[in-house]
Image (cartoon, helix red, strand yellow):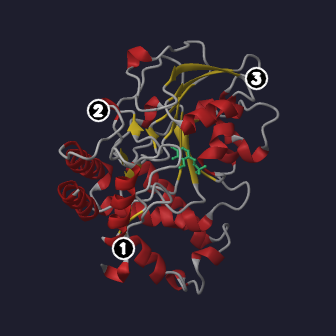
Amino acid sequence: MKYNRIFNFSAGPGQLPETVLEQARDEMMNYHKTGMSVMEMSHRSKDFLAIFEAAKEGLRKAMCVPDTHEILFLQGGATAQFAMAPLNLLNSQNPHADYAVTGNFADIAAKEAKKYGVVSTSYNGGPDYTHIPVQSELTLDPTADYFYYCANNTIFGTEWHYVPETGSVPLVCDMSSDILTQTVDVSRYGLIFAGAQKNLAPAGLTLAIIRRDLAGHAMPITPKIMDYQIMIDKDSMLNTPPCWCIYMLGLMLRWVEEQGGVQALQKRREQKAAMLYEAIDSSRLFTAPADAFSRSCMNVAFRTESTELDAKFLAGAEERGMKNLKGHRLTGHMRASVYNAMPIEGVQALCDYIRDFDKEN
Ligand code: PMP
């Protein structure tokens, strides 16, 4: 393979498209005749502001973000949003939010929110987290300040395949591991956030998309840097933003457009997931722990019945140039993360290997 690269099934930071990396390389030493790299530019300079605006507009277009919503480029990862969301969206007088706990990241987010208000749990799928609730399984609180869920559970390999209906309660969603992989009706959400390092850009950038009327009511203890309204007023530049990552996001968004946009990527993600689950389901040795209805298209979790066979499978995968298939330590299973930049050929290679391994063992 070109540059001796491998198929990288890492859950994050994830693989980036080769053409994006090549463009970044080509522009590294002297960006558009500025005589410097983007990493060395003032965030207030004309050149960087053009990069910033293009990335923001590119994202607005790719995700069809309506005018009612602001796009923010933040830092601190999705983890900072676990605190930022409650600090900004809870009602200071009677703070109360509703969380669907379908994985460890939603669990961490709910625990963080408990520092600032009362948290009710409309669903708890622990400790196995193999199931995503259908609407009727959610015990919703119609008086909550917001309802929180995590669209794709990176570690457990489950994903919501519908948007929960919550009436007038604003929806808050962690889309860290499936943003930009399928079309989303942003108008249905109060807040969407995502760490960038799987489908958007390198680690260091956090995206937030917030309905404008929900900002401006932060709790008085909220740090300035965590106040959505202040960040809106400052156009994400209260302090130095993650300039390089924003530039990389711009390159990624152009790549998304070249691929045919999010709709085309959605078809591809469905194709990739179908290929993998078909290989797993038709094998004798492998099973996928997630419920059929809850299976993630992004993080395909699977295992054999023996840890020795799993270890043998992983070692053989490395020999074939497929790396980072070992799952999270919390689960013990294997996991193929197939974000936007994972080509069909990588998935095909893994499916072929699953079939060969199944025959030979
Ligand atoms: N939410 C999800 C769904 C994730 O996958 C991750 C990281 N893998 C996080 C939150 C935490 O993100 P960060 O490391 O950007 O804080």
Q: Secondary structure at mark 3?
A: loop
Q: Position of residue 175 (x, y in %)?
A: 48, 42
Q: Position of residue 111 (x, y in %)?
A: 67, 31
- Where 304 sits versus 110, above or below? below
The CA span between labels 1 and 3 is 48 Å
For discs 3 and 2, the disc positioned in front in the rendered view: 2
Name which residue type carries label 3. Ser
Name which residue type carries label 1. Thr
**Left or right: where 132 falls relative to 98:** left
User: Badge 2, how many Cα within 10 Å: few under 14, some, many 20+?
Assistant: few
Q: Which residue is mark 2?
A: 292
- Where 151 sits versus 13, above or below? above
On the rendered image, what quadrant is the C terminus found in? bottom left
Q: Residue at x 46, y 32 (%)?
A: 129
The mark that comes first in sequence, 1 or 3, is 1
User: Badge 3, how many Cα within 10 Å: few under 14, some, many 20+?
Assistant: some
Q: Nearer the viewer, residue 346 or 208?
A: 346
- Where 71 sits versus 51, above or below? above
* Residue 344 picture quarter: bottom left
**Left or right: where 77 falls relative to 348:** right
The mark that comes first in sequence, 3 or 2, is 3
* Residue 30 picture quarter: bottom right
Q: Nearer the viewer, residue 191 or 216?
A: 191
Q: Which residue is mark 1?
A: 19
Q: Which residue is mark 3?
A: 92
